[in-house]
Amino acid sequence: MVTTGEQARKIGQAETFSLASYLQERAAIVEEALDRSLPIGDPAKIYEAMRYSLLAGGKRLRPILCLASCELSGGSIEMALPTACALEMIHTMSLIHDDLPAMDNDDYRRGKLTNHKVFGEDIAILAGDGLLAYAFEYVATRTRGVPPLQIIDVLARLGRTVGAAGLVGGQVLDLESEGKPDISAETLSFIHTLKTGALLETSVVSGAILAGASPEDIDRLTRYAKNIGLAFQIVDDVLDITATTEELGKTAGKDLQAQKATYPSLWGIEGSMSRARELVEEAIERLSVYGPAAEPLRAIARYIVSRKN
């Protein structure tokens, strides 16, 4: 088969694709949008607390995945950006609440003092609540160029993702598993599919929904996202053991201290990393039908198992 000029151009783009440049460029877009999304209001203290954690940096992986899947599905950055910001608001809420003394009780997040260490536990709880509520408002009022039913679909998925069938449920099961030596791999995978994987999955799928992707494409991207979500958590468990506090930007060794069920406790470090790499290869295979256009999603999948924090 003769390769057309357009196909050759796309293949060349894939061969020269730089993930570092891509992440830097997309993160800058997200950072600017997040800063604009949440100006200081009244009462100022709660807005300051919300902005403190929302703008504290980080990989911005979830919003970047949303933008990437929207573009892959024929949409634009502009139509996906409000949802991308909302995903980071929800993720930030989960970190604020996760760090509280009643939960994982951590003093540092993203290399900075945790929200409750700066503003107090009461304001930290309310800052998380404020970000969660605002995420839905932001998608509903700021999304442009997308049919209403697709926006409603995204809002419903965000609600399920953050609730008892997703992040909250996973956190409960994670807390209940502490100190129990007989947690199976199946149970652990279920915990982290809810706690970590659900938001990553919704990040990918929501971008495709906004762009009007077909049910077949949404199913394909869902399978990709489930795999990278589980791989992400496996690597997190490994890094908690192998990385330093400085590298992580949060306290290292917390899982062991809290006697949490982790993948290394079941499979060891090498076994855990081997499984993570298998999941990523399976995820990449799901993207084969898209050709070079899916290179950002492929590269992000590979990054998940090579990252140091």
Image (cartoon, rainbow, N blue to C red):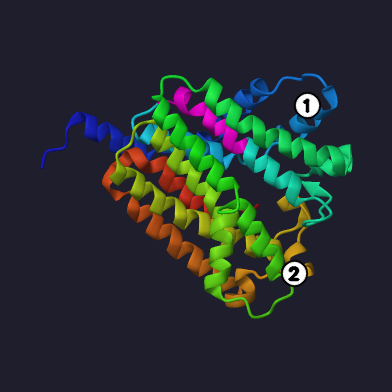
Contact between labelled residues 1 and 2, with CB atoms less than 8 Å apart: no
In the displayed structure, 309 sits above or below 132; it is below
Instruction: Name the residue tied to disc 2.
Output: 256
The main secondary structure of the magenta stretch is: helix
In the rendered structure, which amino acid carries the disc numbered 2? Leu
> What residue would you read off at disc 1?
47
* Of residues 80 and 252, the one drawn nearer to the viewer in this rendering: 80
Q: Nearer the viewer, residue 9 or 227?
A: 227
Mark 1 Cα-neighbour bin, 10 Å: few <14, some 14–19, many ≥20? some
Q: Position of residue 173 (x, y in %)?
A: 65, 64
- Residue drawn at (20%, 29%) of the image: 5
Q: How far from the left and from the top, in percent, is residue 69?
A: 41, 38
- Residue 58 in magenta stretch: no
Q: Distance between the residues labelled 2 and 1?
A: 35 Å
Q: From what the image shows, is residue 123 above or below residue 38? A: below
Q: Is mark 2 on a helix, strand or loop?
A: helix
Horizontal relation, residue 17 to residue 55: left or right: left
Residue 8: x %, y % from top left: 24, 35
Q: Position of residue 82 (x, y in %)?
A: 54, 27
Q: State which tag comes first along the sequence, 2 or 1.
A: 1
Residue 11, numbered circle = none
Counting the numbered discs, the total is 2
Viewer-nearest of discs 2 and 1? 1
Tell me where the magenta segment starts and ends, as one range. Answer: 76-88
With 88 as the anchor, is 303 left or right in this view? left
Secondary structure at numbered mark 1: helix
Closer to us: 252 or 75? 75
